[in-house]
Image (tube, grey):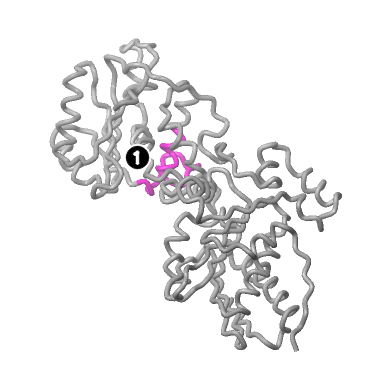
Amino acid sequence: MKKKIKIKLLPHQKHLLKSKKNYVCMICGRGAGKTYAASLLCAISALTGDRILVGAQNYKSLSINLFAEITKRLDEIIGFNNYHYNRGQTIIEIPMSRGVIYGFTYENIDSCRGYTEINKLVLDESALSPPTVLETVGPCCRGTGKDPQYFFLTTPKAGSWFNLFVKNKLEKDPNSIDVIKARSTDNKFISKTEYEMMLGGFTNETLIRQELEGELLSEQAENSVLAGVYYHKGHDPMPLEGYVNIGIDASGFGKDKSVITYRIGNYWMQKSYATLNGQDCRLEIRRMLQLNPGWKVNGICIDMAYGESLYENLCQEYEGVDLINFASKPVDDQYANIRAEMYFDLVRKIREGMKITDDIEKELNVTLFEFNNSGKLKLVSKDEIKMVLGHSPDQSDSLALTFAIGDKVYEKGKEAIGTTQEYYCDPED
């Protein structure tokens, strides 16, 4: 005899369960009922024979929160004796339908490699997942004979790959995506007192819009390196004289671009190249110095990734050429590595009045910082920045590299140079 279960669902939860689109995004304020909807989606799908892959932030979120809710739904529908739950491996099997629910965490996404014939991918709090999550788990959704569905249930996060992913899908392939939005107040099971207490925890209007209203904000994230920085944009010429720091970000096997930046104090210019080998790089710098006879080379810093051939060629002609390993130890112990240190030195110059282009502004706005386990400042991975931008942050990397050895020589010669001219880079270069 079939068991009749009465389940009260909110409109946005019903929408999630009925959607047939390839990409289904439930973008909600906190407390809007995402976890309940995800657990019911997984339970019903498994009972109809689907194989589901479920992701969460960490093991605690996966086992104590999401899988606990899934087992509650299964208990309500078929009873706890009719499915098998392997807690250690976070796998639920339903013999009667042959449906399976596999769990994995964003901390260990490689654990799901090898899974196949997945019908549905469910990513809880997907805005907090790494930008490479779909690259890793997407290939698991094959061999079913029908189109898989990807479900994203999350509170949005400004500056995240997820926000950009949704916006790009809506612009380029709107028929493939279903965006379901809900505010915290749309959950009628939250009392007025509970909501007011949630609201009282926020003093920032932007965060209220994001965390409670569930808005996909385009504003910069609060942990962007440019957050709270007053800066100028524009175009001023480089000084005719001065000690120049040169930063070079080399492209790898034709990917992205190679960029050379020349900087004197607060003034800089840069040029991008589709390809740039060691000899061409040396000739380009020589040409630039011939055009500007008043420039003296303070130092040349090259990103170690793909930069070795450039380093070998430049060492033949110049002193003070350095290969910079972004993961190497910084001078200032408050930073986790030299990459973070040189970026924050760059931001310090911007505070002092160094102007930036639209492209540099865009790259720095999505360059987010966080603290590691030792309490030191670090930047999010370049993979995450590339996912948001759609390309590598070549221009800001090249500019930041001009700070890898500091301005010591320039500062000593500053009075002799005697320039107070305001600056900046040619956006066409």
Residue type at the position of mark 1:
Asp
Is residue 334 found inside the magenta-colored segment of the image? yes
Give the secondary structure at mark 1.
Answer: helix
Dominant secondary structure of the magenta stretch? loop
Let me know if residue 245 appears in the view. Answer: no
Where's residue 296, x and y in %? 23, 22
Tell me how many marks there are: 1
Please name the residue that numbered disc 1 is placed on. Answer: 394
* Mark 1 neighbour class, 10 Å CA radius: few under 14, some 14 to 19, many 20 or more: many
Let me know if residue 147 appears in the view. Answer: yes
> In the depicted view, which residue is nearer to us: 28 or 304?
28
Where's residue 391, x and y in %? 37, 44
The quadrant of the rendering that contains the C terminus is top left
Residue under the point 76% across and 44% down: 201
Residue 365 relative to residue 319: left or right: right
Say above or below: 88 vs 367: below
Residue under the point 37% across and 46% down: 326
Farthest front residue in view: 175
Is residue 148 found inside the magenta-colored segment of the image? no
Residue 239 relative to residue 76: left or right: left
For residue 203, what is the image quadrant? top right
Span colored in magenta = 326-345
